[in-house]
Protein backbone atom coordinates (compact mmCIF):
# COMPACT_ATOMS: atom_id res chain seq x y z
CA UNK A 1 0.00 0.00 0.00
CA UNK A 2 1.81 3.11 -1.24
CA UNK A 3 -1.07 5.47 -0.49
CA UNK A 4 -2.09 6.21 3.08
CA UNK A 5 -5.18 4.45 4.43
CA UNK A 6 -7.19 5.94 7.29
CA UNK A 7 -9.13 4.02 9.92
CA UNK A 8 -11.59 4.96 12.64
CA UNK A 9 -12.55 2.52 15.39
CA UNK A 10 -15.10 2.80 18.16
CA UNK A 11 -16.05 0.50 21.01
CA UNK A 12 -19.52 -0.88 21.74
CA UNK A 13 -22.60 0.40 19.95
CA UNK A 14 -25.47 -0.65 22.22
CA UNK A 15 -27.99 1.30 20.17
CA UNK A 16 -31.72 0.92 20.82
CA UNK A 17 -33.11 4.30 19.72
CA UNK A 18 -33.11 6.32 16.52
CA UNK A 19 -31.26 9.60 16.15
CA UNK A 20 -33.87 12.32 16.59
CA UNK A 21 -32.09 14.53 14.06
CA UNK A 22 -28.61 15.18 12.73
CA UNK A 23 -27.58 17.98 15.09
CA UNK A 24 -24.21 19.66 15.50
CA UNK A 25 -22.98 17.02 17.96
CA UNK A 26 -23.67 14.27 15.45
CA UNK A 27 -22.23 16.21 12.51
CA UNK A 28 -18.93 16.82 14.31
CA UNK A 29 -18.36 13.10 14.73
CA UNK A 30 -19.71 12.16 11.31
CA UNK A 31 -17.34 14.69 9.70
CA UNK A 32 -14.33 13.09 11.38
CA UNK A 33 -15.56 9.62 10.38
CA UNK A 34 -15.98 10.78 6.77
CA UNK A 35 -12.22 11.33 6.58
CA UNK A 36 -11.61 7.59 7.05
CA UNK A 37 -11.69 4.73 4.56
CA UNK A 38 -12.85 2.25 7.20
CA UNK A 39 -15.10 3.02 10.20
CA UNK A 40 -15.54 0.18 12.69
CA UNK A 41 -17.90 -0.51 15.56
CA UNK A 42 -19.02 -3.48 17.63
CA UNK A 43 -22.80 -3.96 17.37
CA UNK A 44 -23.93 -5.13 20.79
CA UNK A 45 -27.63 -5.55 20.08
CA UNK A 46 -29.65 -7.87 17.91
CA UNK A 47 -31.64 -6.00 15.27
CA UNK A 48 -35.00 -7.42 14.21
CA UNK A 49 -38.78 -7.18 14.59
CA UNK A 50 -38.85 -9.91 17.25
CA UNK A 51 -38.36 -12.68 14.71
CA UNK A 52 -36.37 -14.46 17.41
CA UNK A 53 -37.49 -16.12 20.64
CA UNK A 54 -35.80 -14.91 23.86
CA UNK A 55 -33.05 -17.28 24.95
CA UNK A 56 -33.13 -18.85 28.40
CA UNK A 57 -29.90 -16.95 29.07
CA UNK A 58 -28.76 -13.54 27.88
CA UNK A 59 -25.77 -11.25 27.99
CA UNK A 60 -27.44 -9.31 30.81
CA UNK A 61 -30.47 -7.65 29.34
CA UNK A 62 -32.01 -9.15 26.19
CA UNK A 63 -30.55 -6.69 23.70
CA UNK A 64 -32.85 -5.90 20.78
CA UNK A 65 -33.53 -2.90 18.59
CA UNK A 66 -35.43 -2.10 15.44
CA UNK A 67 -33.34 -2.68 12.29
CA UNK A 68 -33.82 1.04 11.64
CA UNK A 69 -30.98 1.76 14.07
CA UNK A 70 -28.66 0.47 11.37
CA UNK A 71 -29.58 3.56 9.36
CA UNK A 72 -28.21 5.67 12.21
CA UNK A 73 -24.91 3.80 12.25
CA UNK A 74 -24.66 4.58 8.56
CA UNK A 75 -25.34 8.26 9.29
CA UNK A 76 -22.20 8.27 11.43
CA UNK A 77 -20.27 6.64 8.61
CA UNK A 78 -19.86 3.13 10.07
CA UNK A 79 -19.15 0.57 7.33
CA UNK A 80 -17.47 -2.33 9.17
CA UNK A 81 -19.16 -4.22 12.01
CA UNK A 82 -18.18 -6.94 14.46
CA UNK A 83 -21.04 -8.64 16.28
CA UNK A 84 -19.52 -11.62 18.06
CA UNK A 85 -20.32 -10.72 21.67
CA UNK A 86 -22.31 -11.73 24.72
CA UNK A 87 -25.62 -10.48 23.26
CA UNK A 88 -25.48 -12.16 19.83
CA UNK A 89 -27.92 -14.94 20.76
CA UNK A 90 -30.15 -13.07 23.20
CA UNK A 91 -33.03 -14.00 20.87
CA UNK A 92 -31.83 -17.48 19.93
CA UNK A 93 -31.12 -18.59 16.38
CA UNK A 94 -34.08 -16.64 15.02
CA UNK A 95 -32.63 -13.38 16.32
CA UNK A 96 -29.22 -14.29 14.94
CA UNK A 97 -30.60 -15.10 11.50
CA UNK A 98 -32.71 -11.93 11.40
CA UNK A 99 -29.82 -9.69 12.49
CA UNK A 100 -27.65 -11.23 9.80
CA UNK A 101 -30.35 -10.49 7.22
CA UNK A 102 -30.77 -6.86 8.21
CA UNK A 103 -27.04 -6.23 8.34
CA UNK A 104 -26.86 -7.53 4.78
CA UNK A 105 -29.91 -5.53 3.73
CA UNK A 106 -28.28 -2.33 4.97
CA UNK A 107 -25.04 -3.14 3.15
CA UNK A 108 -22.70 -3.64 6.11
CA UNK A 109 -19.60 -5.79 6.02
CA UNK A 110 -19.82 -7.80 9.24
CA UNK A 111 -17.96 -10.68 10.87
CA UNK A 112 -17.82 -13.01 13.85
CA UNK A 113 -21.15 -14.84 13.53
CA UNK A 114 -22.36 -17.53 11.17
CA UNK A 115 -24.49 -20.58 10.50
CA UNK A 116 -21.55 -22.78 11.51
CA UNK A 117 -18.06 -22.44 12.95
CA UNK A 118 -16.33 -22.05 9.59
CA UNK A 119 -18.63 -19.19 8.62
CA UNK A 120 -18.36 -17.48 12.02
CA UNK A 121 -14.55 -17.68 11.87
CA UNK A 122 -14.22 -16.49 8.30
CA UNK A 123 -12.54 -13.16 7.45
CA UNK A 124 -14.86 -10.63 5.84
CA UNK A 125 -13.54 -8.06 3.40
CA UNK A 126 -14.35 -4.43 2.73
CA UNK A 127 -13.17 -2.82 -0.48
CA UNK A 128 -11.97 0.79 -0.18
CA UNK A 129 -10.41 3.20 -2.63
CA UNK A 130 -7.10 2.72 -0.80
CA UNK A 131 -7.12 -1.04 -0.52
CA UNK A 132 -8.82 -4.15 0.75
CA UNK A 133 -9.34 -4.62 4.51
CA UNK A 134 -10.17 -7.88 6.31
CA UNK A 135 -12.06 -8.20 9.59
CA UNK A 136 -11.94 -11.23 11.89
CA UNK A 137 -14.23 -11.03 14.91
CA UNK A 138 -14.33 -13.20 18.05
CA UNK A 139 -15.54 -13.05 21.63
CA UNK A 140 -14.28 -14.54 24.88
CA UNK A 141 -17.46 -13.62 26.78
CA UNK A 142 -20.36 -15.89 25.88
CA UNK A 143 -22.61 -18.66 27.14
CA UNK A 144 -21.28 -22.09 26.17
CA UNK A 145 -24.37 -22.84 24.07
CA UNK A 146 -23.67 -19.80 21.86
CA UNK A 147 -20.46 -21.22 20.44
CA UNK A 148 -20.75 -21.97 16.72
CA UNK A 149 -20.30 -25.65 15.84
CA UNK A 150 -18.32 -27.21 13.02
CA UNK A 151 -20.04 -28.84 10.08
CA UNK A 152 -19.35 -32.45 9.09
CA UNK A 153 -20.17 -34.47 5.96
CA UNK A 154 -22.88 -36.23 7.97
CA UNK A 155 -24.08 -33.34 10.18
CA UNK A 156 -24.86 -29.67 9.77
CA UNK A 157 -23.04 -27.14 11.90
CA UNK A 158 -24.47 -25.04 14.73
CA UNK A 159 -25.10 -21.30 14.31
CA UNK A 160 -23.31 -19.04 16.73
CA UNK A 161 -20.33 -16.85 17.53
CA UNK A 162 -16.65 -17.23 16.79
CA UNK A 163 -15.36 -18.22 20.25
CA UNK A 164 -12.15 -17.53 22.07
CA UNK A 165 -12.22 -19.86 25.05
CA UNK A 166 -9.55 -19.58 27.70
CA UNK A 167 -7.99 -21.67 30.44
CA UNK A 168 -7.98 -20.57 34.07
CA UNK A 169 -5.62 -22.11 36.63
CA UNK A 170 -5.47 -20.88 40.21
CA UNK A 171 -2.13 -21.10 42.00
CA UNK A 172 -2.04 -21.80 45.73
CA UNK A 173 0.65 -22.72 48.23
CA UNK A 174 1.22 -26.39 49.20
CA UNK A 175 -0.56 -25.93 52.54
CA UNK A 176 -3.56 -24.30 50.83
CA UNK A 177 -3.74 -27.18 48.36
CA UNK A 178 -3.98 -29.64 51.24
CA UNK A 179 -6.88 -27.64 52.66
CA UNK A 180 -8.65 -27.72 49.28
CA UNK A 181 -8.24 -31.49 49.01
CA UNK A 182 -9.56 -31.95 52.52
CA UNK A 183 -12.62 -29.82 51.77
CA UNK A 184 -13.21 -31.73 48.52
CA UNK A 185 -13.12 -35.06 50.38
CA UNK A 186 -15.53 -33.87 53.06
CA UNK A 187 -18.03 -32.17 50.71
CA UNK A 188 -17.92 -34.61 47.75
CA UNK A 189 -17.65 -31.63 45.42
CA UNK A 190 -15.78 -33.83 42.92
CA UNK A 191 -18.16 -36.82 43.18
CA UNK A 192 -19.47 -36.47 39.61
CA UNK A 193 -15.94 -36.22 38.23
CA UNK A 194 -14.92 -39.36 40.11
CA UNK A 195 -17.97 -41.21 38.76
CA UNK A 196 -17.22 -40.17 35.19
CA UNK A 197 -13.63 -41.36 35.60
CA UNK A 198 -14.83 -44.78 36.85
CA UNK A 199 -17.27 -45.08 33.95
CA UNK A 200 -14.62 -44.09 31.42
CA UNK A 201 -16.51 -40.92 30.47
CA UNK A 202 -13.47 -38.75 31.19
CA UNK A 203 -9.77 -39.28 30.85
CA UNK A 204 -7.27 -38.98 33.65
CA UNK A 205 -4.35 -36.61 33.39
CA UNK A 206 -0.82 -36.77 34.72
CA UNK A 207 -0.63 -32.97 34.80
CA UNK A 208 -0.09 -31.43 38.24
CA UNK A 209 -3.59 -30.00 38.51
CA UNK A 210 -6.34 -30.53 41.05
CA UNK A 211 -10.01 -29.99 40.19
CA UNK A 212 -12.17 -28.43 42.85
CA UNK A 213 -15.63 -28.59 41.33
CA UNK A 214 -15.38 -26.60 38.10
CA UNK A 215 -12.16 -24.85 39.15
CA UNK A 216 -8.59 -25.98 38.51
CA UNK A 217 -5.75 -25.46 40.98
CA UNK A 218 -2.02 -26.09 41.01
CA UNK A 219 0.72 -25.59 43.56
CA UNK A 220 2.82 -22.49 43.00
CA UNK A 221 5.18 -20.22 44.84
CA UNK A 222 2.43 -17.71 45.59
CA UNK A 223 -1.28 -17.31 45.24
CA UNK A 224 -2.57 -16.06 41.90
CA UNK A 225 -4.35 -16.90 38.67
CA UNK A 226 -3.01 -17.88 35.26
CA UNK A 227 -5.17 -17.37 32.17
CA UNK A 228 -4.19 -18.54 28.68
CA UNK A 229 -6.03 -18.68 25.35
CA UNK A 230 -7.52 -22.00 24.30
CA UNK A 231 -5.06 -23.56 21.84
CA UNK A 232 -7.73 -24.81 19.43
CA UNK A 233 -9.45 -21.43 19.20
CA UNK A 234 -6.14 -19.58 18.97
CA UNK A 235 -5.05 -21.81 16.11
CA UNK A 236 -8.35 -21.35 14.23
CA UNK A 237 -8.24 -17.57 14.56
CA UNK A 238 -4.59 -17.28 13.54
CA UNK A 239 -5.31 -19.52 10.53
CA UNK A 240 -7.96 -16.99 9.52
CA UNK A 241 -5.38 -14.21 9.96
CA UNK A 242 -2.96 -16.09 7.73
CA UNK A 243 -5.62 -16.39 5.04
CA UNK A 244 -6.66 -12.75 5.33
CA UNK A 245 -3.05 -11.53 5.21
CA UNK A 246 -2.70 -13.04 1.76
CA UNK A 247 -6.08 -11.81 0.55
CA UNK A 248 -6.13 -8.24 1.87
CA UNK A 249 -3.90 -5.21 2.34
CA UNK A 250 -4.75 -4.76 6.02
CA UNK A 251 -6.09 -7.16 8.67
CA UNK A 252 -8.13 -6.16 11.73
CA UNK A 253 -9.00 -8.51 14.59
CA UNK A 254 -11.92 -7.62 16.85
CA UNK A 255 -12.18 -9.18 20.32
CA UNK A 256 -15.09 -8.70 22.72
CA UNK A 257 -13.98 -9.47 26.27
CA UNK A 258 -15.35 -8.61 29.70
CA UNK A 259 -12.66 -10.62 31.49
CA UNK A 260 -10.39 -8.59 33.73
CA UNK A 261 -7.17 -8.84 35.68
CA UNK A 262 -8.24 -9.74 39.21
CA UNK A 263 -10.85 -7.21 40.29
CA UNK A 264 -9.42 -4.42 38.12
CA UNK A 265 -11.93 -3.96 35.31
CA UNK A 266 -9.65 -1.39 33.64
CA UNK A 267 -7.01 -4.07 33.05
CA UNK A 268 -7.46 -6.88 30.51
CA UNK A 269 -7.00 -10.47 31.60
CA UNK A 270 -3.60 -11.93 30.78
CA UNK A 271 -5.01 -14.28 28.12
CA UNK A 272 -6.32 -11.27 26.17
CA UNK A 273 -2.87 -9.71 26.12
CA UNK A 274 -1.37 -13.02 24.96
CA UNK A 275 -4.10 -13.43 22.33
CA UNK A 276 -3.71 -9.89 20.98
CA UNK A 277 0.06 -10.11 20.65
CA UNK A 278 -0.21 -13.55 19.02
CA UNK A 279 -2.60 -12.07 16.46
CA UNK A 280 -0.05 -9.37 15.59
CA UNK A 281 2.73 -11.97 15.46
CA UNK A 282 0.69 -13.96 12.93
CA UNK A 283 0.08 -11.00 10.66
CA UNK A 284 -2.77 -8.87 12.00
CA UNK A 285 -2.25 -5.11 11.65
CA UNK A 286 -4.54 -4.02 14.50
CA UNK A 287 -6.54 -5.55 17.36
CA UNK A 288 -9.67 -3.73 18.51
CA UNK A 289 -11.00 -4.66 21.94
CA UNK A 290 -14.33 -3.81 23.57
CA UNK A 291 -16.67 -5.31 26.13
CA UNK A 292 -16.17 -3.94 29.67
CA UNK A 293 -17.98 -0.67 28.81
CA UNK A 294 -15.03 1.37 30.02
CA UNK A 295 -11.65 2.32 28.59
CA UNK A 296 -8.58 0.12 28.82
CA UNK A 297 -5.03 0.84 27.73
CA UNK A 298 -3.46 1.05 24.29
CA UNK A 299 -0.35 -0.89 23.33
CA UNK A 300 1.79 -0.38 20.24
CA UNK A 301 3.20 -3.84 19.55
CA UNK A 302 5.51 -4.30 16.57
CA UNK A 303 4.18 -1.05 15.06
CA UNK A 304 0.59 -2.32 15.33
CA UNK A 305 -2.04 -0.84 17.67
CA UNK A 306 -3.79 -2.98 20.26
CA UNK A 307 -6.80 -1.25 21.78
CA UNK A 308 -7.67 -3.33 24.84
CA UNK A 309 -11.04 -1.57 25.15
CA UNK A 310 -12.46 1.51 23.51
CA UNK A 311 -15.38 1.64 25.93
CA UNK A 312 -18.78 2.70 24.63
CA UNK A 313 -19.59 4.60 21.46
CA UNK A 314 -23.39 4.42 21.86
CA UNK A 315 -24.89 3.08 25.09
CA UNK A 316 -28.68 2.80 25.41
CA UNK A 317 -29.18 -0.34 27.47
CA UNK A 318 -32.24 0.92 29.35
CA UNK A 319 -34.59 2.11 26.61
CA UNK A 320 -35.61 -1.18 25.01
CA UNK A 321 -39.38 -1.37 24.59
CA UNK A 322 -39.88 -4.87 26.02
CA UNK A 323 -38.03 -7.60 27.87
CA UNK A 324 -38.87 -11.27 28.57
CA UNK A 325 -40.39 -12.49 31.82
CA UNK A 326 -37.03 -13.90 32.95
CA UNK A 327 -35.62 -10.40 33.33
CA UNK A 328 -38.58 -9.22 35.41
CA UNK A 329 -38.42 -12.28 37.65
CA UNK A 330 -34.78 -11.52 38.40
CA UNK A 331 -35.95 -8.40 40.26
CA UNK A 332 -39.08 -9.88 41.83
CA UNK A 333 -41.42 -8.28 39.27
CA UNK A 334 -44.36 -9.84 37.42
CA UNK A 335 -46.60 -9.12 34.42
CA UNK A 336 -48.28 -6.23 36.18
CA UNK A 337 -45.00 -4.30 35.82
CA UNK A 338 -43.63 -2.54 32.74
CA UNK A 339 -40.16 -1.80 31.36
CA UNK A 340 -39.91 1.49 33.26
CA UNK A 341 -40.51 -0.46 36.48
CA UNK A 342 -37.89 -2.97 35.39
CA UNK A 343 -35.18 -0.39 34.73
CA UNK A 344 -36.03 1.40 37.98
CA UNK A 345 -35.64 -1.89 39.86
CA UNK A 346 -32.37 -2.77 38.17
CA UNK A 347 -30.79 0.59 38.98
CA UNK A 348 -32.66 1.13 42.26
CA UNK A 349 -34.07 4.26 40.68
CA UNK A 350 -30.80 5.40 39.11
CA UNK A 351 -28.68 4.94 42.24
CA UNK A 352 -26.60 1.89 41.27
CA UNK A 353 -25.08 0.14 38.29
CA UNK A 354 -23.80 1.57 35.01
CA UNK A 355 -25.84 4.72 35.36
CA UNK A 356 -23.79 5.87 38.36
CA UNK A 357 -20.34 5.22 36.86
CA UNK A 358 -19.04 8.22 34.92
CA UNK A 359 -16.38 6.05 33.25
CA UNK A 360 -19.13 4.17 31.42
CA UNK A 361 -20.36 7.45 29.90
CA UNK A 362 -17.00 8.85 28.83
CA UNK A 363 -14.88 7.20 26.19
CA UNK A 364 -13.02 7.84 22.97
CA UNK A 365 -12.72 6.76 19.39
CA UNK A 366 -9.42 6.35 17.60
CA UNK A 367 -8.23 7.42 14.18
CA UNK A 368 -5.06 6.12 12.62
CA UNK A 369 -3.23 6.20 9.31
CA UNK A 370 -1.09 3.56 7.66
CA UNK A 371 1.26 4.02 4.73
CA UNK A 372 3.23 1.25 3.00
CA UNK A 373 2.14 -1.05 5.83
CA UNK A 374 3.55 1.25 8.51
CA UNK A 375 1.54 2.98 11.24
CA UNK A 376 2.30 6.68 10.77
CA UNK A 377 -0.23 8.44 13.01
CA UNK A 378 -2.67 7.55 15.81
CA UNK A 379 -5.07 10.05 17.35
CA UNK A 380 -7.59 9.76 20.19
CA UNK A 381 -10.82 11.75 20.27
CA UNK A 382 -12.63 11.90 23.62
CA UNK A 383 -16.41 11.59 23.72
CA UNK A 384 -19.11 11.85 26.37
CA UNK A 385 -22.44 10.02 26.35
CA UNK A 386 -24.60 12.08 28.67
CA UNK A 387 -23.71 11.08 32.21
CA UNK A 388 -26.41 12.38 34.57
CA UNK A 389 -29.03 12.85 31.89
CA UNK A 390 -32.41 11.02 31.95
CA UNK A 391 -32.39 7.59 30.34
CA UNK A 392 -34.46 9.01 27.45
CA UNK A 393 -31.58 11.33 26.51
CA UNK A 394 -28.28 9.70 27.48
CA UNK A 395 -26.35 7.29 25.34
CA UNK A 396 -25.49 9.38 22.25
CA UNK A 397 -21.84 10.38 21.73
CA UNK A 398 -20.62 13.93 21.50
CA UNK A 399 -17.07 15.22 21.25
CA UNK A 400 -15.70 16.19 24.64
CA UNK A 401 -13.71 19.30 25.42
CA UNK A 402 -12.44 17.82 28.69
CA UNK A 403 -8.90 16.46 28.86
CA UNK A 404 -9.72 14.11 31.75
CA UNK A 405 -10.71 11.27 29.37
CA UNK A 406 -7.40 11.55 27.55
CA UNK A 407 -5.55 11.69 30.86
CA UNK A 408 -7.30 8.45 31.82
CA UNK A 409 -6.13 6.92 28.54
CA UNK A 410 -2.59 8.12 29.31
CA UNK A 411 -2.61 6.41 32.71
CA UNK A 412 -4.06 3.17 31.39
CA UNK A 413 -1.64 3.01 28.44
CA UNK A 414 1.52 3.90 30.31
CA UNK A 415 2.09 0.33 31.68
CA UNK A 416 2.25 -0.82 28.04
CA UNK A 417 4.98 1.71 27.29
CA UNK A 418 2.62 3.90 25.30
CA UNK A 419 3.05 7.67 25.55
CA UNK A 420 0.10 9.92 24.69
CA UNK A 421 0.49 13.65 24.16
CA UNK A 422 -2.55 15.89 24.58
CA UNK A 423 -2.86 18.80 22.18
CA UNK A 424 -5.98 20.92 21.71
CA UNK A 425 -8.25 18.29 23.17
CA UNK A 426 -6.93 15.42 21.02
CA UNK A 427 -4.58 12.64 22.06
CA UNK A 428 -1.58 11.88 19.89
CA UNK A 429 0.19 8.56 20.44
CA UNK A 430 3.96 8.74 20.24
CA UNK A 431 5.20 6.37 17.53
CA UNK A 432 8.75 5.15 17.02
Image (cartoon, rainbow, N blue to C red):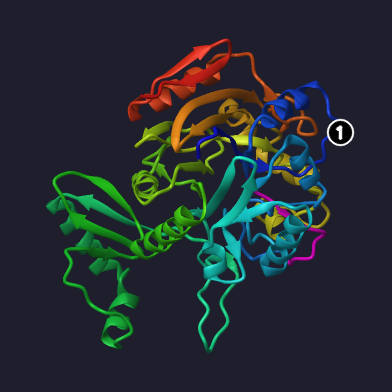
Q: Name the residue under label 1.
A: 20
The answer to whether residue 51 is magenta is yes
The one of 357 and 84 positioned closer to us in this rendering: 84
Q: Is residue 165 above or below residue 256?
A: below
Where does residue 322 sit, x and y in percent of width and height?
Answer: 80, 53
Q: In this view, does 278 lie above or below 197?
A: above
Q: Residue at x 35, y 44 (%)?
A: 277
Where does residue 133 sit, x and y in percent of width and height?
Answer: 56, 48
Residue 87 appears in view = no
Q: In this view, does 370 lie above or below 157?
A: above
Residue 388: which quarter of the image?
top right
Q: Which residue is drawn at 36% across and 64% down?
A: 214
Element under label 1? loop
The one of 391 and 180 positioned closer to us in this rendering: 391
Residue found at the far right of this picture: 21
The one of 131 and 117 positioned closer to us in this rendering: 131
The answer to whether residue 20 is magenta is no
Q: Residue at x 52, y 73 (%)?
A: 149
Left or right: residue 108 versus residue 147 is right
Within-10-Å neighbours for mark 1: few <14, some 14–19, many 20+: few
Q: Give the range drawn in magenta.
A: 42-53
Most common secondary structure along the magenta stretch: loop
Q: Which residue is drawn at 27% across and 52% down?
A: 170
Residue found at the far top of this picture: 424
The one of 294 and 173 positioned closer to us in this rendering: 294
Residue found at the far front of this picture: 2
- The count of marks equals 1
Where does residue 44 sit, x and y in percent of width and height?
Answer: 64, 48
Amino acid sequence: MESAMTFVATGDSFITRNLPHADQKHREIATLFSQADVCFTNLEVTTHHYEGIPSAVSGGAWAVASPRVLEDLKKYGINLIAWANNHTLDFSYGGLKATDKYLNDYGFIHAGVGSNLAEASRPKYIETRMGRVALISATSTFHETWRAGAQRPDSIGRPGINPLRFNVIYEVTPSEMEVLKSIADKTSINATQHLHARLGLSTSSDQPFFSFGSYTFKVGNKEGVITTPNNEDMRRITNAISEAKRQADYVIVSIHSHEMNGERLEEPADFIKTFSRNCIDKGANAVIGHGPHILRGIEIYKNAPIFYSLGNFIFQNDTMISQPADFYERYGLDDTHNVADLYDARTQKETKGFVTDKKVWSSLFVKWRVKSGKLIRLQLYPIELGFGKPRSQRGWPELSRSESILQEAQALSSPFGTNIHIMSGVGEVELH
